[in-house]
Image (spheres, helix red, strand yellow):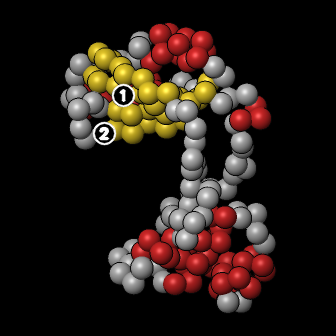
Amino acid sequence: MPKISNIFGESDSSGLDRFDLEILDVLSKDGRISITDLAQRVGLSKTPVQARVRRLEERGIITGYRAMIDPIPLGLDHVAFVEVRLSDTREGALAAFNKAVMQIAEIEQVHLIAGNFDYLLKIRTRNMAAYRHVLAEKISTLPHVSHTSTYVAMQAIKENGSDDFS
């Protein structure tokens, strides 16, 4: 993830100060850091850092902590991006699609798009045969799907925002 304070710059309308932004920067790179070490890194004592982290969690800015898993050693190195066009884009149809798409484990990301198609999906599978099965038996049967287009990724240059070039 890019350095959060670099994204906000001087004009922060979120109500976060430079300490909050630095806490987010550090936690985005090391979610397992101790409060003591985090306090040292941001230049505050332990108690205010604990309070700030708790406030960031309560505001929903920090949504959780998890292990980042590299899918490549697990054999999940086939990535495809799928444009999906729906036959109906009224709210009920979008809600039905959104609910159904959440049930497909191979779909890593789902984005509603403003453009020539309605959704962009990121699919991760073991190989092309597995992808074809997911497309035919799962994605194509989702509510209101009328058309799909697939783009297969040859190489991931940057994923998960984990490479910080700032």
Q: CA distance from mark 1 to mark 2?
A: 9 Å
Disc 1 residue type (three-letter): Glu
User: In the image, 138: left or right of 160?
Assistant: left
Say which residue label 1 marks. 83
Q: Secondary structure at mark 2?
A: loop
User: In the image, 144: left or right of 37?
Assistant: left
Say which residue label 2 marks. 113
Q: Nearer the viewer, mark 1 or mark 2?
A: 1
Can you give x and y, in whole percent of width and height, for residue 166 in the image? 55, 71
Disc 2 residue type (three-letter): Ile
Q: Who is closer to the viewer here, 139 or 35?
A: 139
Q: Secondary structure at mark 1?
A: strand
| The quarter of the displayed image where residue 79 is located | top right
Residue that appears at 36% across and 28% down: 83
Can you give x and y, in whole percent of width and height, for residue 158 in the image? 57, 50
Label 1 with label 2: CB-CB less than 8 Å? yes
Q: Who is closer to the viewer here, 16 or 81?
A: 81
Q: Residues within 10 Å of mark 1 (few under 14, many from 20)?
A: some
Q: Who is closer to the viewer here, 48 or 39?
A: 39
Tally of numbered discs: 2
- Report whether residue 75 is seen: yes
Q: Residues within 10 Å of mark 2 (few under 14, many from 20)?
A: few
